[in-house]
Image (cartoon, helix red, strand yellow):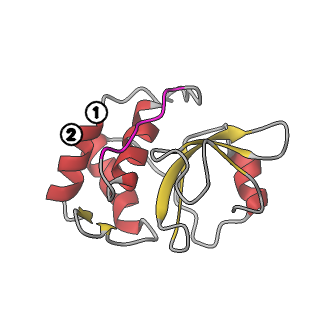
Amino acid sequence: MMQYDPTHPRVVQDDSWSCSCATTSWMLQSVGVYAPYPTVEQDMLAAGLVTRGDGLLVGSAGPLTRWVPEHYGVQTGRVVAPVSWGWLRENAGNKPIGIGSSVWYHWSGVRAAGVDGNLLLANPADGHMGVPQEMTQQQF
């Protein structure tokens, strides 16, 4: 079993569309998989999971969660939307979690649950729509 490191440095996206690529790279790196962001981005483009114009093409991330084990040999879990705040608080910190939203139009890693009740993020675009590296239940 791979050891999860919630303190692994966030991966910063370098364009406007690749938040899912940066989040995927962070999630993999946080469990010790060599997955540099530029490589993950190129591989996700080649696999047809993302485009430069639209970002992640299937917002539920179903194809992405099937691709990661095939490409990296790392098993993923998938929770069907909508994900509850309670589920996130309960599971954050046990494993890397990626969250996305069609309202937020963004993807981010979830590191852990904070003692104040917020989620600690590995947000690849710090401050996107007012959400820095921590998310409140109201922002959720």
Residue at the location (77% across, 38% down)? Answer: 114
Please say if the residues under marks 2 and 1 sit with CB atoms less than 8 Å apart: yes
Secondary structure under tag 2 reads helix
Residue at the location (83% across, 46% down)? Answer: 117
Is residue 22 in the magenta section?
Answer: no
Secondary structure under tag 1 reads loop
Q: Quadrant of residue 104?
A: bottom right
- Read off the residue under disc 2: 39
- Read off the residue under disc 1: 36
Residue type at mark 2 is Thr
Residue at the location (63% across, 73% down)? Answer: 82
Instruction: Describe residue 8's horizontal placement relative to residue 44 as left or right.
Output: right
Residue at the location (37% across, 72% down)? Answer: 58
Q: Position of residue 123 (x, y in %)?
A: 52, 45
Q: Position of residue 122 (x, y in %)?
A: 54, 40
Q: Position of residue 37 (x, y in %)?
A: 29, 38
Q: Position of residue 7 (x, y in %)?
A: 58, 26
Up-down relation of residue 139 to residue 69 (above or below): below
Secondary structure mostly taken by the magenta-highlighted segment of the chain: loop
Up-down relation of residue 140 to residue 113 (above or below): below
Range shown magenta: 8-14
